[in-house]
Amino acid sequence: MPRLLERFIGRKDDIPRTAALGRVFNVTRQTWRLSDDPAKVRPAREPLTTGKTASEAADFARDVAGAFPRHGFHRRSGSWWAVEGEWFHRFTVHTTPKRKAAILLIATGLAGLAAVAVARRRGGARRRS
């Protein structure tokens, strides 16, 4: 390999060991009331999507924020934001360790099954009366 190219490929500090590659990026919405103090009040968190590439997750966060009339991008935090009435939303792109991602998927699946079971049970009670 020519020495000229080695300086690009041989760098050890290019990608930190914790850098995530592949489809491991997620988008989470954090929501506060505009009257809340974010230093004191924890946001409501909602995972919006998982298992995306960094580019797909960033595009998704931008598109979701863009659906609101007032929205923008905060360069220092790397997050998209939107305002809806009295609510402030922040859309963050982040990684999740594989173990946490698996737990999240299992929990989401179980919650879905529970919701279906409750819906069927309520539907059966209505038919009987």
Image: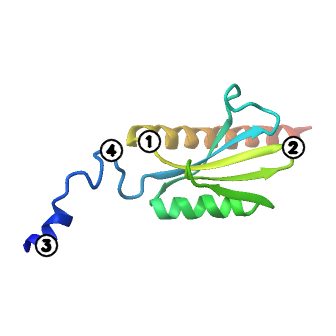
How busy is the neighbourhood of tag 4: few (under 14 within 10 Å), some, or many (20 plus)? Answer: few
Kind of residue indicated by mark 4: Thr
How busy is the neighbourhood of tag 3: few (under 14 within 10 Å), some, or many (20 plus)? Answer: few
Reading the image, the residue beneath label 4 is 18
In the rendered image, which quarter is residue 100 located in?
A: top left
Distance of label 1 from label 4 (alpha carbons) = 19 Å
Mark 4: which secondary structure? loop
Reading the image, the residue beneath label 2 is 127
In the rendered image, which quarter is residue 17 located in?
A: top left
In primary-sequence order, the first of circles 4 and 2 is 4
Distance of label 3 from label 1 (alpha carbons) = 43 Å
Distance of label 3 from label 4 (alpha carbons) = 28 Å
Mark 3: which secondary structure? helix
Reading the image, the residue beneath label 3 is 4
Reading the image, the residue beneath label 1 is 102
Vertical side of 53 occupied by 101: above or below: above
Mark 1: which secondary structure? helix
Q: Quadrant of the N terminus?
A: bottom left
Distance of label 4 from label 2 (alpha carbons) = 55 Å
Which residue: 41% across, 57% down? 23
Dot 3 and dot 4 residues touching (CB under 8 Å)? no
How busy is the neighbourhood of tag 1: few (under 14 within 10 Å), some, or many (20 plus)? Answer: few
Q: Quadrant of the C terminus?
A: top right
